[in-house]
Image (cartoon, rainbow, N blue to C red):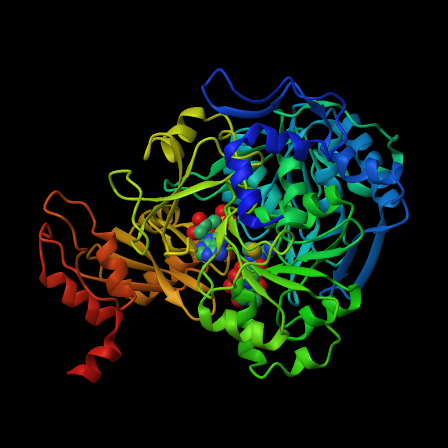
Amino acid sequence: MSYQTEYQSSLQDPEGFWARQAQKLDWYRPADEVLSTDEDGLYRWFKGAMTNTAYLALDYHVENGRADQVAMYYDSPVTQTKAQFSYRQMRDRVAKIAGGLKKLGVCKGDTVIIYMPMIPEAVMSMLACARLGAVHSVVFGGFAPHELAIRIDDARPKVLITASSGIEVDRIIPYKPMVDKAMELAEYKPKKVVIFQRKLGALVPSKDYDVDFEEMEEQAEYVGCTPVYATDPLYILYTSGTTGKPKGVVRDNGGHAVALRYSMEAIYGIKPGDVYWAASDIGWVVGHSYIVYAPLLTGATTVLFEGKPIRTPDASTFWRVISEYQVKVMFTAPTAIRAIRKEDPKGQFIKQYDLSSLKFQFLAGERCDVDTLTWLQGQLGIPVVDHWWQTESGWPMLSNFPGIELLEVKPGSVSKPVAGYDLRILTEAGEESPAGEEGYVAVKLPLPPGCLPTLWNNVEGFKSSYLERFLGYYFSGDGGFKDAEGFTYITGRVDDIINVAGHRLSTVEMEEVVAAHPDVAECAVIGADDSLKGQIPLALVVCHQTGRPFIEVAEEIVASVRSEIGAVAALKKVYQVPRLPKTRSGKILRKLLRAIVNAEELKIPSTIDDPAIVEEINDIVHPSVKQITS
Ligand code: COA
Ligand code: AMP
């Protein structure tokens, strides 16, 4: 079948198309309606159907000839550990962990927060929640206690699961003290904290609410899978929005399973038994979808990698993993490739490994520069596919399709819409933009299965964030254009979200922390282009006249962003400026600031209150450029 036929059939008859895809899964009960709307007027897929995602991901394969196939390889260069788990072993451990959680009172519909490093128990905990029909919310380990506390208060988990520590290259990160701090900060108190002891020498303070993970698992009884409705939530994943508060993206059970199962074959060209590796973290959507759920729903083998593309121990580590586990398709962020290329520009490490198993390399999570993509393609000699999606969609929206038809790989483009996504580029007025003209990337409703049906306890926020900008469309927050052949190019966010090393962060959230410093009168946090991380945050601050050296203030600001949001925010540059450029009505001109910081062509709006400030800030942020030109 050609891509075009597949795509057209998904738009002409969405219900028929997705009903056919749903038949590939083993349901407890079929849907009453394939597509319907709920009491809030929001689209829902597979109403009335009953399923269990952990059953589909594990038990189904155990019962259908894959019991002894490896479900997951665990490779941890930071602890020098390797392990593998067959589908049967995974199912058995997940069933006991679920039994342990059940004993702690976790029932269908309850929420559980998982704040863990990249260890097998993290994946098993996610699946154990799914087995019980409980809703997990994984919080990325790079977030600080304050961020964890915000998520505890919003998700109100009965239980929080953590580990004693994580490892960042060679540095032990004690998780438990951060969890205890978050428990103090949060208004809502989970009943129990289950800790997996990694025995890495990290401090593990004990509290009344602590439960030992291994003891819990050992003493537990196996529990079966609780049937849930397709429309019941499987997980909540918090992501940065345009306000200071993260948004709880909800994923349902049925549509999610159907969409991910479809994506593995159609997009990635993965069949049951193949090995697939997404080098991400389970704290991000890529980890949820393509480390945990999609490979297991497909009966493929996934790789859980606890390390970095470089320094664990060097830039060869990705190629070693691919060759050691015979990975067929790999997925990572362009930042990782830029980091590898910096260390190994001639690809000497790549040549040392037999990479013949690798058929396609996928990239996503941030914009991929053409140079990085062509370098990688040249080194690997296979198609490198840049594809585009978001936490909200949960699976790719624009991609190439090795599983159906490999389209021309046009560097710089994220190719064409995936089945089910009626993707349009809209003008400010909501009209369709002509080819070649940049506009807003939107998807005509309904979104296909797998995409967020709503935000956790925030239907109004869902509508205002995504559905109200262009009526009848989901608005992605990204800008882009299509060329004459319909290939799409993403030009970047049109809001205050930035992408730092593939990590999505809100500048507004950082501004709240910077502005809270007593010496700061006002501030703006801007995404600055970075040759390694894509973007890095940079703070411009106007200070009160206190007489304190600015260097001290700047150090305190950096430390507070690190302690309030987390090391992953990577705010390291703070500039003192006399004023911020504003409109006459007092609105900060962020677009102008972005242009100044990134040394782009400056279009100074006529509404600016004080044009002289532009040159002053330019001199502060780019002093060397000034010296050269003057
Ligand atoms: N727990 C605790 N701290 C964490 C963490 C975690 N899970 N993840 C990152 N951090 C810390 C890092 O240690 C670092 O701290 P530092 O400032 O004290 O050095 C900081 O957060 C920034 O981390 P990171 O963005 O990973 O930068 P890095 O300089 O350590 O590594 C890269 C650079 C390019 C190697 C790394 O960013 C990378 O591998 N990027 C790919 C990202 C990716 O796969 N994203 C998933 C989307 S698909
Ligand atoms: P996240 O929700 O963390 O996955 O981040 C989603 C955002 O990352 C998107 O809205 C884009 O801004 C950006 N993004 C993801 N993939 C790509 C890509 N392939 N090209 C350009 N931007 C991307």
Say if residue 210 shows up in the picture. yes
How many numbered badges does the structure rendering display?
A: 0
Residue 75 in percent (x, y) is at 76, 61
Q: Is residue 318 above or below residue 244?
A: below
At 13% from the left and 48% from the top, the residue drawn is 583
Which image quadrant: the C terminus?
A: bottom left
Q: Quadrant of residue 132?
A: top right
Residue 257 in percent (x, y) is at 67, 36
Residue 567 in percent (x, y) is at 51, 57
Q: In the drawing, does residue 176 fall left or right of residue 520? A: right
Outermost residue on the top side: it is 39
Residue 282 in percent (x, y) is at 64, 49
At 76% from the left and 27% from the top, the residue drawn is 104
Q: Which of the pair 77/522 is nearer the observer?
A: 77
Q: Is residue 229 above or below residue 504?
A: above
Q: Is residue 498 above or below residue 110?
A: below
Q: Which of the pair 570/503 is nearer the observer?
A: 503
Q: In the drawing, does residue 27 fall left or right of residue 615? A: right
At 28% from the left and 65% from the top, the residue drawn is 597
